[in-house]
Amino acid sequence: MNTNYIFLTGGVTSSLGKGITAAALGSILKLRNLKITIIKLDPYININPGTISPMQHGEIFVTEDGTETDLDLGHYERFMNTKMTVQNNFTTGSIYKKVLKKERNGDYLGSTIQIVPHITNEIKKNIISKFKKKDIIIVEIGGTVGDIECLPFLEAIRQIALDVGKNKILYIHLTLLPYIITSHEIKTKPTQHSVKELLSIGIQPDILICRSDRKIPQKEKSKIALFCNISEKSVISLQDVNSIYTIPNLLQYQKVDDYICKKFKLNVPKANLQDWNKIIYQENNPKGTVIIGIIGKYVTLPDAYRSVIEALKHGGLKNRIFVNIKLINSQKIKSHNIHLLKSLNGIVIPGGFGKRGIKGKLITIQYARENNIPYFGICLGMQLALIEFCRNVAQLKHANSEEFEPQGKYSIIKLAENDKNKNIKIQYKNKKFQGTMRLGNQTCKIKKNSLAWKLYNSDIIIERHRHKYEINENLFKKIEKYGIRISGKSINNKIIEIIEINNHPWFIGCQFHPEFNSTPRNNHPLFVGFIKASTIYSIKKKQNI
């Protein structure tokens, strides 16, 4: 199969939405009956983002095969209803690691190892050889043009045009058009300079997608086209929108997919965006509103909880409810200021690592449990729910996690053992990150007549994991009589996957990360059920008032 390549670069500034743009474009092209995939190239030297703080680049997204990747792969999956793998994301660090390993093995026969051709050849190999049965591969290059870290990637994508032929290559450049309030003008100069930087590398963009807080007037489009040496039709306006799920329509309306299919001589039907139109209608026509609190320690950067935020919105779509999400810093929650939680109709504590902010989360869980507020604990959120229950219900005042108190007497949460039967593998071997990490898809058995079983309507589920601590079942058996139960376990009965509290309207903790499997077209049952329960709580709360 003759594969075509779309290379998406960014200029002027980061965080313009290259990942969402690539995902939306991939969605449209897939709906044209084309075989599409997306590769993300990250310029940082980390092997993968697994050890990077979420405050640096946002959440770590986990694929089915257990690869820790950039959060943009979550956008790809949500927009395209497809699954990413280890082959869809690689970093500068992973490229250098492969090249250095080959050098140590003598594969280069004594050659002096250089950026060009050895590093660029390895980059090209990872792009071209990975997916040979695709019509189009969209390649998103992280960072911005002009960053020193991006140069090897940009040089590699320039060379690919020579290797496979320019008729198989299309370059898209995403830039910022700032609006100056004092002069009431959209400024095109930053875009011009960004394109000039690309040209100096040897890359002429075919399409410019221009981000702005408003629609770009025709006058500015003409100016950009003239100075950037492209046609006016190739200057695409991508203004700020209330919902990212309107972007496929915006791109199709401006015929970006038509341009691509014409360029690659692909005779395929138009994309039917009926599903996206349905999603937009559901978003714009809710029947009510719920206020959901995400209690965490990375709340100043919403991308740290991007998949959870999107999954909550997906649950709202299914229920025709607008989900008003409040990100609350757990470190600010104290016993004397519990009023921070009083407006909430549902509470989520997502995954995380480390001791910081734990006290505030435990106070929050107690508040949700005692006031019958729907509670959803994910990974760490489940573990903390169990610790809170042990301390305040089961009279185990010193119950804790080995993560916070390694030598504790009552460790209800313990470090996962390196047990092959549990599909746990060693992830980190250095002193700071000692332990094992359970990653990727794992099979779970659901107990009948549980809330989880009613939501899933299935005995067996498969969910993605990312954790290195698990429930100590020996200690758990001592507290079941107080009203907590196991509703899900691993397929071999060795790991507790889901817990529930009896006599509570909706209180679930799960060891896995269900947010990674939620899309706007395939809403995850746990999030759908959580939003439904939060809506019922909201209605009852108003009636009592």
Image (spheres, rainbow, N blue to C red):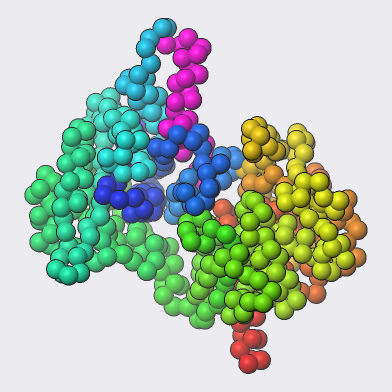
Residue 517: image location, x then y, percent: 57, 54
For the point 56% across and 46% down, which residue is it? 62
Res 24 → quadrant: bottom left
Looking at the rendering, the stretch of residues picked out in magenta corresponds to 83-108
**In the rendered image of this protein, does residue 385 appear above or below residue 54?**
below
Is residue 98 one of those drawn in magenta?
yes
Q: Please report the residue visible at 10 percent of the width from the left and 61 percent of the height from the top.
A: 219
Q: Nearer the viewer, residue 77 or 347?
A: 347
Q: Residue at x 70, y 53 (%)?
A: 511
Residue in the picture at 62% in, 53% down? 352
487 over 435 or under it: above or below:
below
**Is 379 situated left or right of 276 in this image?**
right
Depth order, front residue of 208/348: 348
Q: How many marks on residues?
A: 0
The answer to whether residue 166 shows anywhere in this view is: yes
Name which quarter of the figure residue 332 lies in: bottom right
Q: Is residue 146 magenta?
A: no
Quadrant location of the N terminus? top left
Tell me which corner region of the image, top left, top right, bottom left or bottom right, holds residue 277.
bottom left
Task: Indicate the position of residue 344 as horizontal and vertical percent values.
Answer: 60, 77
Q: Identify whether 100 is placed above or below 392.
A: above
